[in-house]
Image (cartoon, grey):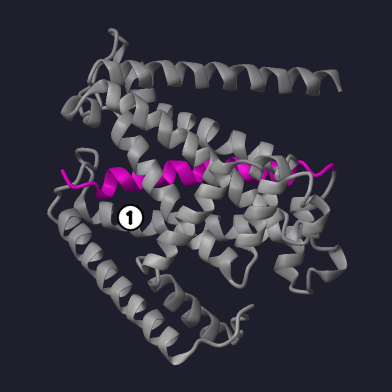
Amino acid sequence: MKMKNAFTIFKNTYSTCLLIFSIVIIMGLVFNSETQLSSDVHPVLAFFLIWGAILWLSMVEGGQGALVGLTPINRDMYSDTHPTTYKCTEIAYKGDNLDRYLLGRQFMVVLLVFVINLSGAPLPGAELWGFPTALTNMFLVTGVAMILFTAMVGQLMSQVNAAHCMLDYLNNHSALITIWVALAIEFSGLLHASYLMQMLVAKVSGHTIESLESPRTRMQNIFFWSRCFMSVTILGLCFAVTLEALFQGKTTMWDGVPNAVSVFLFFLLMSVVGLLEGMQIAFFAVAKVCKSDRGDNPIAFKTCELLFKGQGLNLPGFMIGRQLCVVACFFIIARVTTIN
């Protein structure tokens, strides 16, 4: 037990030291105009943008866990003690709004990560305070500092706190505004191509998509399918521009990486991110389901056994590892796809 406690203290200590060091060197890059935004505009703008984006990202990430986790809880139990949380869940649980929120929220995460990357990621050839080349390559060139900063400050801390304090985490107007923004993004139709993919997967798997709302009227159908068409068109144009830039080597991908490898990495990492994001939602939801109600699929059963066995530390451990993988994938994707 003493060895276990000592190892935990050691991990916590070196993790905290790495985080502090990462924050210091990122802020150093910003104020030395060694990032794209601080170089092109002004370091002060980059400073406020990176911290504004990281704080909003923490609300987006923590809010998701809280909203999904509170789904089976009777809302009347906290209507008086947590009025803002009650408003948040009243909006999110109305009809299919939770699905809409999750869709818009994902766009917000990607957008905020790209803003953080734009504000804090080092320019090619950036140097800081005479650091040795090995140290510069380890933390700056590879993006480790940005990954640790974004994952620990903007995502993991909020997710851990929200998992234990769901009601308190949503009991503020920042959470309410975040929900409205996510729903507005979904309403815009930019992401409606995702619904087509959902329909395709449901068709292939033989499942029916269940809705908590009444069937759409004719006008609602026209509005829905027109947004789907717009979304697919925009997605196709984005794919065309991105792939053209990748095949021509006109992105900020690291020098020496073949164009074909860049294209392969793009699709591979996008698939990994999609898988990990879907797993997170599924695990949050199934954590509140009784063991007898988790179905009889052997793979799903083994997955749940692994996640929830022992003292329940495997699920938080997975979430931490998952988040680091997702952030790393996001930053590599940003590097692969950003047009130079």
Q: Main secondary structure of the magenta part?
A: helix
Amino acid, disc 1: Phe
x%, y% of residue 128? 28, 13
Q: Is residue 215 visible?
A: yes
Instruction: Return the residue nearer the eye: 209 or 202.
Output: 209
130 relative to 232, above or below: above
Residue located 41% across and 87% down the image? 219
Secondary structure type for disc 1: helix
x%, y% of residue 209? 59, 81
Q: Is residue 134 visible?
A: no
x%, y% of residue 52? 42, 33
Residue located 28% across and 7% down the image? 130
37 relative to 279, above or below: above
Taking the image as shown, residue 269 lies to the left or right of residue 246, namely: right
For the record, the magenta segment spans 311-340
Q: Which residue is mark 1?
A: 266
Q: Quadrant of the C terminus?
A: top left
| 332 falls in the magenta region | yes
